[in-house]
Image (spheres, rainbow, N blue to C red):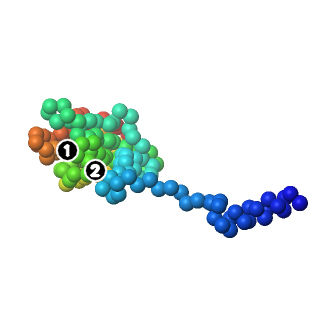
Amino acid sequence: MRGSTKTILLAAALSIGGIVVNPAPAVASVAGPAHTVAPAVSPERVCGPGFARVARSKQAVRTPSGDVLGHVYLLYDRRTGYNCVTTIKTSNVGVATFASATVTTQRMGASSSGPGRNEGRQVKSHIGPLKVYGKGRCVRYSGTIWDDGRGAAVAKARWKSWGRCG
């Protein structure tokens, strides 16, 4: 008899709204859309599935005075043999400023460079992906970010010599 009494009491409580079952998840909203944060941009996300960062290939994009405005990344997909380069801003994110990325390949032992890609335009967070075939080739890459602020400096990073041969 005790079990049926509990069932009756529970049913009564539910019918008058005393117990909430499966409440909707709470959504925290501090100040509306003006304070929403865009999802973080990562080089892997920009380049896509299969691409992984090449060891020690992250280069700081610096102004002549040493300020870092972002980073340029080299990634590689072992399955397809493609390289991918992206320049990602860490300063003035959300504000359109000029950024560029370049990637060039060279056949191992060759004296001239092979196919490459270069892209530059106004961006709010990143430029790329720039993809070039790289199996059996060496790579050179670079990134540039313009600071349109008071100093109006240009920040650059580049892999100075042919490397990352594969």
Residue 142 shown left or right of residue 80 in the figure = left
Residue, x 79% and y 59% (percent of image)?
6
Give the labeled residue for mark 1.
145
Give x and y (percent) for residue 68: 23, 36
Q: Secondary structure at mark 2?
A: loop
Residue 71 seen in the figure? yes
Numbered disc in front, either 1 or 2? 2
Q: Secondary structure at mark 1?
A: strand
Instruction: Provide residue 141's location: percent of width, then percent of height.
Output: 26, 42
Residue count near mark 2 (Cα–Cα under 10 Å), binned few <14, some 14–19, many ≥20? many
The CA distance from mark 1 to mark 2 is 11 Å
Image coordinates for residue 15, horizontal then vertical, percent: 68, 68
Please say if the residues under marks 1 and 2 sit with CB atoms less than 8 Å apart.
no
Image quarter in which the C terminus is found: top left
Q: What residue lies at 33% left-to-right and 42% top-to-bottom?
A: 74
Q: Amino acid at mark 1?
A: Ile
On residue 125, the disc is 2
Residue pushed farthest bottom?
A: 15
Q: Nearer the viewer, residue 70 or 93?
A: 93
Q: Residue furthest right?
A: 1
Left-right relation of 67 to 73: left
Nearest the camera: 5 or 48? 5
Q: How far across and down, in percent of the image, does residue 50 sit?
A: 45, 49
Label 1 neighbour load within 10 Å: few <14, some 14-19, many 20+: many
Vertical side of 72 occupied by 6: above or below: below
Which quarter of the rendering shows the N terminus? bottom right
Compared across the picture, whether 97 is left or right of 2 comes to left
Q: Going 18% across and 39% down the picture, which residue do you hit?
A: 155
Residue at 40% x, 47% y is: 44
Q: Earlier in the sequence, mark 1 or mark 2?
A: 2
